[in-house]
Amino acid sequence: MKVMIIGGGKVGTYLANYLLSENHEVRLIELRPEEKPRILLDVPESVLYFGSGTDPDTLEAAGIRKMDVVAAVTGIDEVNLVATSLARFEFMVPRTIARINHPKNAWMFTEVNGVDVALNQADLMAALIAEEMSLGDMITLHKLRRGKFDLVEEKVAPNAIASGKQLKDLKLPDQTTIVAVIRSGELIIPSGDFQFEAADEVLAVVHSSQKKDLAKFFDRVI
């Protein structure tokens, strides 16, 4: 993909470096020329452009019309919102992502204002902490469809409801799919007659609202 990153701070340079290592084409926009020596420790000079991420001329010069994604990750919410709005409505970039620094500003970061994905760091941290406290051994590996569904992993406890039972006999939540099971280092794609055993590592896609219901099948019974 072709990705433009607005903001050459620690988040922006790390993101640029990561995307480059994955062989994506990257453009990094930074307002402060004095930051050049630091930025060049992580990314090549060829991807770096200096100017404001809210200046159409700067964005145009950096090739925004060819971008698949624009990610605005500066430490200033107003800049991130204006940059993503310009990307969407002025340059018709297919996908926009914005960092939210202050939770009280989250209400502005909507699709109506040109933001496809808003990353609210405070909310993400709070949600992860609450989730870890309430879901026992279930781990959320990845969020899908903007958080509507989750890819989760959980190990089957010795006395769990699912232990010793076949998949077809479990009345799992209706918006749940068991994707795979790892047993003794081997990956298994389970069919209806697959029988769960203690210590199986279960990978599932589940609606976010049903994770607790799914966890009950694999957690230990107290």
Image: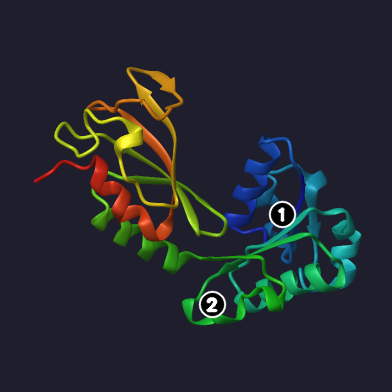
Residue 54 location (% of width, % of height): 78, 73
Within-10-Å neighbours for mark 2: few <14, some 14–19, many 20+: some
Q: Amino acid at mark 2?
A: Ala
Q: Position of residue 3 (x, y in %)?
A: 75, 51
Measuring 72% from the left and 76% from the top, which residue is drawn there? 82
Residue furthest to the left: 222
Q: Earlier in the sequence, mark 1 or mark 2?
A: 1
- Of residue 88 and residue 5, the one placed in the foreground of this image is 88
**Image label count:** 2
Residue located 80% across and 66% down the image: 51
Q: Mark 1, residues whose alpha carbon is within 10 Å: few (<14), some, or many (≥20)?
A: some
**Residue 6 appears in the picture as rendered:** no
Mark 1 touches mark 2? (CB < 8 Å): no
Image check: 199 left or right of 47?
left
* Three-letter amino acid code of the residue under disc 1: Lys
Relative vertical location of residue 103 with respect to residue 138 in this rendering, above or below: below
Which residue lies under the disc numbered 1?
A: 36
Element under disc 1: helix
- Looking at the rendered image, the disc whose residue lies closer to the viewer, 1 or 2, is 2
Percent across and percent down for residue 153 are: 37, 39
**Secondary element type, mark 2:** helix
The residues tagged by marks 1 and 2 sit, at their Cα atoms, a distance apart of: 31 Å
Is residue 31 among the parts visible in the rendering? Answer: yes
Q: Which residue is mark 2?
A: 106
Q: Seen in the image, is 131 located left or right of residue 115?
A: left
Query: In which quadrant of the rendered view does residue 31 lie?
Result: bottom right
Quadrant including the N terminus: top right
